[in-house]
Image (cartoon, rainbow, N blue to C red):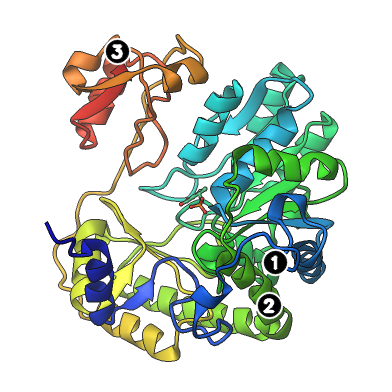
Amino acid sequence: MKPSAPLYHALCAHLQKQRVSLHTPGHKHAHPIFPQDLSALDLTELPDTDSLFEAEGAILAAERETAQVLGVARTLFSAGGCTLCIQAMLRLASMGGKRNVIAGRVLHRSAVHTMALLGLTPVWVMPRADAGPGLPGRVHPQDVRQALLEHPDAACVYVTSPDYFGVLADIAGIAKACQEYHVPLLVDNAHGAHLFFTSQPHPITQGAAMTACSAHKTLPVLTGGAWLNLAGDLFLPAAKDAMALFGSTSPSYPVMASLDLCTGWLHQYATTAYPRLEGQVRQILERAVQLGFGIPQGPCDPTRISLYTPPIGLTGEQTAQYLRQSGIEPEYADASYVVMIPTPCNSPQDFERLEDALQNLPRHPALPETSCVLPPLPPTVLSVREAVLHPGVELPIAQAVGKTAACAACPCPPGVPVVMPGEKITPSAAEFLLAYGFSRVKVLQ
Ligand SMILES: Cc1ncc(COP(=O)(O)O)c(C=O)c1O
């Protein structure tokens, strides 16, 4: 067999379609801050190039400059995505031996997997469905405070904000509750690296002790580039070791260089680029609402475009398909939402094409409003660690009732896991999963 480079050709074929990129990465492919030949920068740890997890030269200097531009105590680079920063945050918070993590139930699988690897126990706080139909909603300070009252010995509180749809939690309120109990607040801010420069604040300025920020999702940074931001010195001494525990010993220098170059771009352009982007997004959202779409309610990332599609008679997936036919590639779609991630690297023409495409979508009678009343939290029968590391098998839902979940089952909508690893699949959880399109679920063998 002669290898045909199928992935390479798939990537080239996709690029030839010249779709407007409204998905990650944030650089949108032609950003002038990147040198032409990035492979020339693909070096390794040399006396001249420093070493990510033992940084004392150029990498340390780059991280310090970034911290200064962002206005935080310390920034650590990751070439392993936000996942590596999440792993490091949870490691740092649990090094003292505390095992309970008060966690918003809407969280990325990297956090669940890290809890498994570190042997941590989640204490779940459910979001309140306050952002509108089809959305998980927000974790509220009073619910976090209640969890802290019941678990004052928690290693940390862990929340995701913004979520995938751009919905922002009341981080200042949650941070206040955490401060009362002297428990650090960790924020998965994967989708909000740019919030340092927008009209809505970044979680670290609202009292988070640490944030994990996927710079590559919303900024001109190569995929894999992320920041672990620290609000103070408490976690600094062990931070590099915590990242090294999970990270590759061969972090990509082009990715780290793109983080470094992004800092210069932010310093020079962010204060003009983000107000302009917010204006462009506001215009799209206003137009979308006139056309009949819904948008998330309450505080949201002002640069995210999340459209609730049932009022125009289309599912989110159908809308995404029509947008692709109009030359626009969105980030994500589910039964009732389509999500797009514009950045300052999109051109004014990109927004015009999006507005035209939205205007030209076919319209049908409205679909029924998405309503999701979640079943009660299933009982936990095994630790997350045991459930994730134990061999699992996929079963049809009907056969899985009474068994223990080996991974999270998260229907979208509402984007809240119905079962987590180690929880028992109850008849009501199974019924809900079936109703929301799940046919199989992974359980312990
Ligand atoms: C909420 C959230 N957290 C964390 C991550 C992981 O980020 P990364 O892909 O940069 O590792 C993602 C990725 O999509 C995410 O959506």
Q: Name which of mark 3 and mark 2 comes first in the sequence.
A: 2
Quadrant assignment, res 374? top left
Asked if labels 2 and 3 touch by Cβ distance under 8 angstroms, the answer is no
According to the picture, the residue beneath numbered tag 1 turns out to be 196
Above/below status of 412 relative to 44:
above
Which one is in front, 341 or 135?
A: 341
Element at label 1: helix
Disc number lying in front (3 or 1)? 3
Query: Which residue in the rendered view is the most extreme toward the left?
Result: 1
Callout 1 crowding tier (Cα within 10 Å): few <14, some 14–19, many ≥20? many
Q: What amino acid is labelled 2 in the image?
A: Leu
**The C terminus: image quadrant:** top left
Report the mark closest to the observer, 1 or 2. 2
| Label 2, residues with CA under 10 Å away: few <14, some 14-19, many ≥20 | many
Q: Earlier in the sequence, mark 1 or mark 2?
A: 1
Quadrant where the N terminus is found in the figure: bottom left
Residue 407: % across, % down = 38, 27
Say which quarter of the image contains residue 62: bottom right
Look at the image and tell me whether residue 112 can be seen.
Answer: yes
What's the amino acid at mark 3? Answer: Gln
Tag of residue 266: 2
Q: How many marks?
A: 3
Residue displayed at 66% across by 81% down: 265
Q: Which residue is mark 3?
A: 445
Q: Is residue 362 left or right of residue 201?
A: left
Query: Quick one: label 3, few (<14), some, or many (20+) residues within 10 Å?
Result: some
Q: Secondary structure at mark 3?
A: loop
Q: Tell me if label 1 and label 2 are in contact, CB under 8 Å.
A: yes
Q: Amino acid at mark 1?
A: Phe
